[in-house]
Amino acid sequence: MAIFKRKLYDRLLEWKTERHGKTALLIEGARRVGKSTLVTLFAEKEYESHILIDFNRTSEIIKSLFEDLTDLNKIFLQLQQNYQVVLKPRKSVIIFDEVQNCPKARQAIKYLVADGRYDYIETGSLISIKKNTKDITIPSEEERITMFPMDYEEFRWALGDTASIDLLRQFYDKKIPLNAANRKAMFDFRLYMLVGGMPQAVSEYLETNNLSLVDQTKRGIIRLYLDDFQKIDPSGNVEKLFRDIPAQLSSNVSRYQPYPVVGNKSEDKMAELLQSLSDSKTTLFCYRCADPSVGMSLNKDLSRFKIFMADTGLFVTLCFWDKDYTENTIYQKLLSDKLEANLGYIYENAVAQMLASSGNNLYYYTFPKDEKHNYEIDFLLSQGNKLMPIEVKSSGYKTHASLDAFCQKYSSRIGQRVMIYTKDLQTEGNTLLLPVYFTPFL
């Protein structure tokens, strides 16, 4: 499989340069998102030698080394002998890959970092699941960062296009429409929505240019996730919550409703199931903000949320999970811009992924329209001391009743108001209408 350029590499380099081994770096993210590939490449380029311990595959003998930390010299000698690698003080890194499968190794980080001889990078998925942490002390010496699927710019890089995103950013900064070029820009973005940002799926597309084979690759990744959910929760409830994400978004309800999916559960049990789903990093939780203001985390309504998929390509495949690829025409319809309006939630999921990849926590807002209906703002971002409300449309329609009502209700709190849709950039009164591919620049 090809190795792709990832932005997180620069974050690793910053950590190595600034910390000098005083902390370990923990990279968490969903399975198959590219964590192991990234840290291996980083170790090969930035250190004289490295050892990668894959706790998915390593022997119990290696795992047992971290049970007794009284003699670190012995541990280092055993590792060097086993992996046939010479470690050099301050010039080598030890990687704990899938560290959740050896909790004692994670706990040992405190003492390994204090020893100071080598750098340490951990990778993990399902890193905070209760069974992986209940018997250990989480080291305060960890710096935790999340690795997301490839964002749109990384996807374009993988396709050999290093120019278009920088050019789009210039158009956005100057608020200039693309005119005739918008058609191709939208086609390129729709391709990203279909393939997604999982390196395995992107590699399959580059090798075969066959979306049917890409779909099969994505199905393999989803099956891996479903297997993980079964291990976490043999009752199958976490899997049910995951598989119901497209149905809940398509129903256009104002929040995810877990109880109809898994039945009557205690609040504590439901919280545990949802936390497991969140910890998997396969999903993005978007919480309702009870009082829309800049300090949105202070007004997070934990009882009302939406759940999106962390990867747009996997989301498209999960939408049609119960059909074979050849039976559905979603790929052709998306590429040819003939997607029905009732599939607009695919665009909403893509926007959620792009906002999260840009470092934003996800919030939305609803308020009553009349006795039976609500207005809804799809996403809220902080913009200095003001709010940026965002409404997402899957078409070129320029109606934005919810946005208008919200901005009237909270006029003193509003900065730029944005509607994301599929047509070219334009301004309509105080509303900025943006083609969806400009989302990463918000």
Image (cartoon, grey):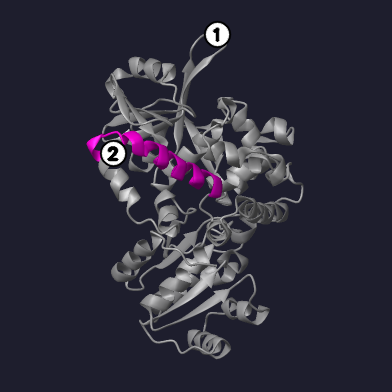
Which mark sits nearer the N-terminus, 2 or 1?
A: 2
Range of the magenta residues?
Answer: 173-195
Query: What is the quadrant of residue 384 in the picture?
Result: top left
Q: Nearer the viewer, mark 2 or mark 1?
A: 2
| Residue under the point 42% across and 16% down | 401
> In the orientation shown, which residue stands out farthest toward the left?
174
Circle 1 SS class: loop
> What numbered label is drawn on residue 172?
2
- Image height check: is 425 above or below 404? below
Q: Is residue 183 left or right of residue 385?
A: right
Name the one closer to the observer, 38 or 334: 334
- Image coordinates of residue 426 in percent, x first then y, are 31, 27
- Image height check: is 389 above or below 231? above
The residue labelled by disc 1 is 371
Q: Is residue 187 found inside the magenta-colored segment of the image? A: yes
| Residue under the point 50% across and 68% down | 37
Q: Callout 2: 10 Å neighbours few (<14), some, many (20+)? A: some
For the N terminus, give its image quadrant.
Answer: bottom right
